[in-house]
Image (cartoon, rainbow, N blue to C red):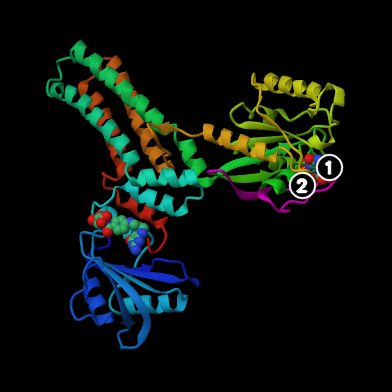
Amino acid sequence: MISNRDTIAALATPLGTSAIAIVRASGPDCAAIARDALELPHPPLPRVATHADYRDRSGALLDDVVAIYYAAPNSYTGDDILEISCHGNPFIAQKILEDLLARGCRPAEAGEFTRRAFANGRIDLSQAEAVMDLIHARSERALTAANQQLRGSLERHLDTLTENLLSALARIEAYIDFPDEDLPAEDRAIVRRGIEELSKGTARLLATQHYGELLREGIRTVIIGEPNAGKSSLLNRLVGQERALVSAEPGTTRDFIEERLHIGPHCLRLIDTAGLNPSPAPLEKLGMQKTLERAAEADLFLLVLDATRPHPNLPPEILEKLSQENALIVLNKIDLVPVAGAATGNSKSLNSKSQTNLKFQISNSKNNNITHFCETSCVTGEGLDALEKAIIDRAETFRRDQGDEIIAINARHADALSRAQTSLVSALAHLDANGPVELLAADLRAALDAYGEIGGRIDNERMLDHLFATFCIGK
Ligand SMILES: Nc1nc2c(c(=O)[nH]1)N(C=O)[C@@H](CNc1ccc(C(=O)N[C@@H](CCC(=O)O)C(=O)O)cc1)CN2
Ligand SMILES: Nc1nc2c(ncn2[C@@H]2O[C@H](COP(=O)(O)OP(=O)(O)OP(=O)(O)O)[C@@H](O)[C@H]2O)c(=O)[nH]1
Ligand SMILES: [Mg+2]
């Protein structure tokens, strides 16, 4: 572990032209550096914005800056901090950083400011991760989830689980020293119920991992359908630019195309794919293979159908992936469907016969009817607002609320929780087999450790090195 006695320094803002850039340092030399570089007549006052000239060690003027000094322990890291806000010229910011290094600071490693905040007990590990989630959040929902995690939402859930686990442990602890004595039936029943509740609570948290991935990575939304249905036209419409090639010739899209897109509070990774042709030419086959690969990792499907044509036979590998939850049918080219005669009303007649066929197909494959559908025209733009709303509705169903908060765990949390779950299941087996109390207790302690890992209460230097290395420099 790197010593907290070093003073670390880094740019806190990206290298580029901007109104202001911030260079910051954390560690015991901050006050002395501030005094010298800013030529203060007295030690810097904590938490006061000071407007001053910044001079390098040789006395050369680098910039007109605003500096803020924070005295330990009341700072982000918990150590002394000096923040220099200079003019947003990367050359100036770099010069100031170089001067800080010349004055004995060490370049900060990735995530080191936040790691110090963690090491100093200002925040736990799930909050440190939330800081990174906050910086990288790409949608309103992702921001909300990160903000709640930063304020300890996940940790509060784990605290409750930990407390309940400790009370189960306490109930059996008394019997550990008496290996010949069985756990009385009454205690056994209470412990059993306790472990079952813990297991349910753990499973509920684990179930938020998928939503966590959607928030962090974006909702992988794959546009599929037969050749020429208008898939690429739909991608272009949704992203609002001519991103994908469109032509009247079937088989235009050969390779998939991906674009990021915001719809309402969600961030989508929208993927246009090669059309699914029941009898593909060799090159088409390669494109379809890629479509199947994208489909395998899709969170949401937009199945585009040409409203003027009978519905296609889709490959069963695709059909079986579609469900009411993850699929939306887009009946496209609705502008070409003749409007029903004026006498019989003005609504556009759907190709209702083929629609029934489709339901039949999908229910055949997985006993699953997909009833969410939108009618669109990528030529007139009709129905696209409704489609966006329908996408938002689908995305909202992936959300897992716990109380009034969004919990969205990451892969590290899921790994620890899965191990906790395995230990709880094993504990139940020992309990049912009336096995030795020591083994039951060992399982419960393993679950306790796994819960503790999430907040970083268990020392694991290598895991910390690995985790903070994924952060950015200066954070
Ligand atoms: N200028 C500046 N803006 C920033 C940060 C920063 O470090 N500097 N932050 C960095 O990511 C974020 C804010 N996070 C912060 C968290 C804690 C403290 C802090 O000084 N905490 C003290 C005092 C408590 C208080 O007054 O709220 C403490 O915890 O004791 C400061 C910023 C975003 N904006
Ligand atoms: N009238 C009408 N034509 C459309 C509509 N959407 C797409 N088209 C036309 O249909 C043809 C095929 O559109 P594409 O977007 O290339 O279809 P695709 O599904 O991507 O086709 P492939 O990449 O070959 O699988 C083009 O001539 C489009 O202009 C629509 O809503 N109405
Ligand atoms: Mg296409």
Q: Quadrant of the C terminus?
A: bottom left
Residue range highlighted in magenta: 239-265
Q: CA distance from mark 1 to mark 2?
A: 8 Å
Quadrant observed for ligand 3 in the rendered image: top right
Question: How many residues crowd mark 2 within 10 Å: few (<14), some (14–19), many (20+)?
Answer: many
Mark 2: amino acid: Thr
Residue extending furthest toward the front: 343
Reply above or below: 127 against 114: above
Please name the residue that numbered disc 1 is placed on. 250
User: Is residue 284 among what the camera can see?
Assistant: no
**Chief secondary structure of the magenta portion:** loop
Q: Quadrant of the N terminus?
A: bottom left
Reply above or below: 415 against 76: above
- Magenta-colored stretch includes residue 43: no
Callout 1 secondary element:
loop
Q: Quadrant of residue 29?
A: bottom left
- Residue labelled 2 has its Cβ within 8 Å of some atom of ligand 3: yes
Q: Tell me where residue 19 appears, x and y as whole percent.
A: 46, 71
Please name the residue that numbered disc 2 is placed on. 253
User: Is residue 419 among what the camera can see?
Assistant: yes
Mark 1: amino acid: Pro
Q: Quadrant of residue 418?
A: top left
Q: Tell me where residue 462 appears, x and y as whole percent.
A: 33, 52
Q: Is residue 139 left or right of residue 271?
A: left
